[in-house]
Image (cartoon, rainbow, N blue to C red):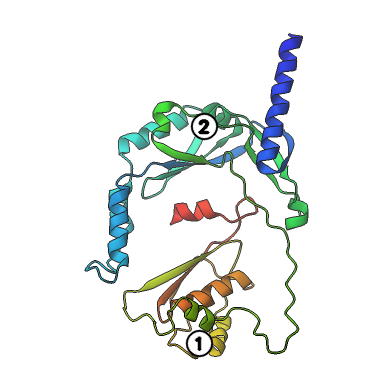
Amino acid sequence: KEREGRKEREREITEKQWYQRRVRGKYLAKADPADSVTLVLARQQQNLETISQLLDMVSDPRSPHYGRYLSIDQIAQIVQPKQSDVEKVLGWVESAGRVNCETVATGDFIKCTTSVKSAERLLETEFVYFEHEESLYAVGEHLVITRAIREYSVPTKIARMLDFVGGVLRVPNVSTRQQPTPAPAEKDFRYGVHPDTLRKRYNVSENVGSNPGNVQATAQFLNQHYSAADLKEFMRFFGKGFPHLTEISKVIGPNSGKPGLEANLDVQYLMSLGANITTVFWSTGGLHEKQEPFLEWAITL
């Protein structure tokens, strides 16, 4: 028994070291079995070659299908997994205990919330709490997250139906604060990159959008919002050499709060290079585990 106990302690230490090397995090404790975790099951899509060809056709101005985009229902009919496979995956998930699942319209993502105890039984792993080593400095608070301490496992027959299970191993990055770069002292130095610089570099100086079917979009995260007033002001200064639009045609999601530098620049330079093209701004409200809710956005999309 003493030897078995020593081996168990050695195994636990090895797993902690593996985990801390993987995520640069500080191991805190085993997760409470009653705590909840959210798992995202990415189902394998069908007919990916077909959907890729359709994407090329609707995006190519030379194609007769240019701009004739498919609806979400039409896309779902092409890529969604077989209903029998979806039922098998859901049956496997529900076999682990009480679980609440929802499936997106296209059927390729299943989002499930369950207890740590059920998730451990389902994936044959162990969940723990860990704290990112640099979170206090980077975001001003201790960032504690729940993740598996070792690789997870699923039955072979189920694994063939999945691309991955999100919310188990991968953790969000924590960006550190950066000091602004001071501008050069030379009076005749043109600091920064301006729209005309990029338009010349990419050889689109004389090109602007003219097809009414053209649409471009940008998605923003981390509570980033753009300013309509700043966009107009930007174009007043830097859009003199080419036809351009000064307004976003459609906003999806919230765009309230203090404008962000990243969102503003993304919108301004997108509409400068893709000049005179209808533009959509997609805003994602809130954070997921203190970071960008990219997978949540992908599921919504």
Which residue occupies 54% across, 87% down? 238
Residue 56 appears in view: yes
> Which secondary structure lies at badge 1?
loop
In the displayed structure, does residue 93 sit left or right of residue 61? right
Disc marking residue 239: 1
Image depth: mark 1 or mark 2 in front? 1
Amino acid type shown at disc 1: Gly
In the displayed structure, does residue 301 sit left or right of residue 256? left
* Mark 1 crowdedness (10 Å alpha carbons): few <14, some 14-19, many ≥20: many
Label 2 belongs to which residue? 98
Residue 272 appears in view: no
Res. 3 image quadrant:
top right
* Mark 2 crowdedness (10 Å alpha carbons): few <14, some 14-19, many ≥20: few
Which residue occupies 32% across, 51% down? 76
Spot occupied by residue 298 in the image (x, y as percentages of width and height): 47, 54
**CA gap, disc 1 and disc 2:** 57 Å
Spot occupied by residue 80 in the image (x, y as percentages of width and height): 33, 46
Q: Is 204 situated above or below 60?
A: below
Spot occupied by residue 47 in the image (x, y as percentages of width and height): 29, 47
Q: Residue furthest left?
A: 64
Disc marking residue 270: none
Q: Nearer the viewer, residue 183 or 113?
A: 183
Which residue occupies 54% across, 62% down? 284
Counting residues from the start of the chain, the first of labels 1 and 2 encountered is 2
Q: Residue furthest top?
A: 1
Amino acid type shown at disc 2: Arg
- Number of numbered discs: 2
Q: Is 217 situated above or below 78?
A: below
